[in-house]
Structure formats: structure tokens, C-alpha cells
Image (cartoon, rainbow, N blue to C red):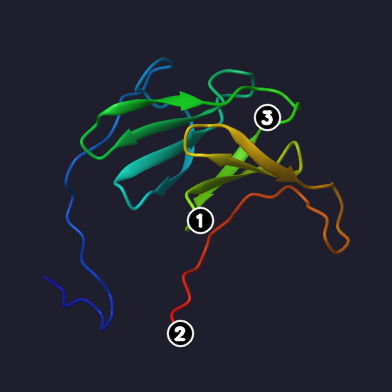
Amino acid sequence: MATPLVGSRTYEYSHTLGIDDFAGRSFRYAVNLTLGPDGMVYVLQRGASTQMNVSVKICNVDEEFFGDFGSYGSEPGQMMWPAAIALDSQQRLYIADEWNQRISVFDTQGNLLDEWGEEGSDDGRLNRPSGMAFLKIHS
């Protein structure tokens, strides 16, 4: 067995979450996920090239399913081509939508709190937002 690099970690496979299907606790076209401090897993899926299953699935690592939220469209709180999800320290979920050119903010139950974004390449504008992360800075 190779010796891990200094500062690196070695991970072992534990188990797989979910099944491949369209309904309930399954995942279809999952593109990103984020983990909450309470052990909750928020899985972002964007469906195929149509309206199918654009949503956030909520589960835990023990495969308990707690529901989902989200719908296809361009109205406030809807998603068309979501690409990234992140959870901040206040338990708010941020979802980047490449097609709608915006960031939507939800609570962990799926209620829309805020959203912003306008298409463009100038400062303050979004050009197909597709990634996101929050960093914890230690002082």
C-alpha cells in the first residue's frame, strides 16, 4: 500500500446512497451535493434536457429520505439548469442556476428566501454560474 502524502487523507468506501429512479428517495441526474452539520445531505439534481426532476432531495447518510423541493421554470424559486449547491453557516442553501443566470437562496425546508443575478460579463453580473463554495476562515 502506498504511503499517503503529508496532509492528505485516505478514505475507505462505506456505502452508496439512493437508487436510480425518478420518484421519492431516488436520484436522477444528480449534479452536486452539500452536507449539513446535522448529518443531512442535500442532493441537487437537474433532470434531463427537459423538466424532469429538477429538485433538491433531502436525506441522510443512513438513507432516510426527508423529502424534496424545487420545480422547473424561470419564476422566482424555480430552477431550469441548476449546477451547484452550497450551505452556509446559517443553514441557508444557495443554488446556482446556469440557465436562469441567478443564485437562489432557500431555507432547508425549501422556502425561497432571496435570489439575485443578471446575465452579463461585467462586474456584478453572472455568466452561467456553475460552481459555489463557502470557506470557513479560522482566525
Compare residues 61 and 109 and report the one nearer the observer: 109
The residue beneath circle 1 is 88
N-terminal of the pair, mark 2 or mark 1, is 1
Distance from disc 2 to disc 1, alpha carbons, whole Å, reads 18 Å
| 1 sits to left or right of 45 | left
- The quadrant in which residue 73 appears is top right
| 48 sits to left or right of 20 | right
The numbered dot on residue 80 is: 3
Q: Are marks 1 and 3 in contact (CB under 8 Å)?
A: no
Distance from disc 1 to disc 3, alpha carbons, whole Å, reads 23 Å
The numbered dot on residue 78 is: none
Helix, strand or loop at label 1? It is: loop
The numbered dot on residue 139 is: 2
Vertical arrangement, residue 14 with respect to residue 8, above or below? above
N-terminal of the pair, mark 2 or mark 3, is 3
**Residue 127 % position (x, y):** 78, 51
| Residue depicted at 48% across the width and 76% down the height | 137
- The quadrant in which residue 49 appears is top right
N-terminal of the pair, mark 1 or mark 3, is 3
| 94 sits to left or right of 135 | right
Mark 2 vs mark 3: in front? 2
Amino acid type of the residue that numbered disc 2 sits on in the rendered structure: Ser
The quarter of the rendered structure image containing the N terminus is: bottom left
**Residue 93 % position (x, y):** 53, 45
Q: Are marks 2 and 1 in contact (CB under 8 Å)?
A: no
**Residue 25 % position (x, y):** 34, 22
Specify few, some or many for label 2: CA neighbours under 10 Å numbering under 14, 14-19, or 20 or more: few
How many numbered badges does the structure rendering display? 3
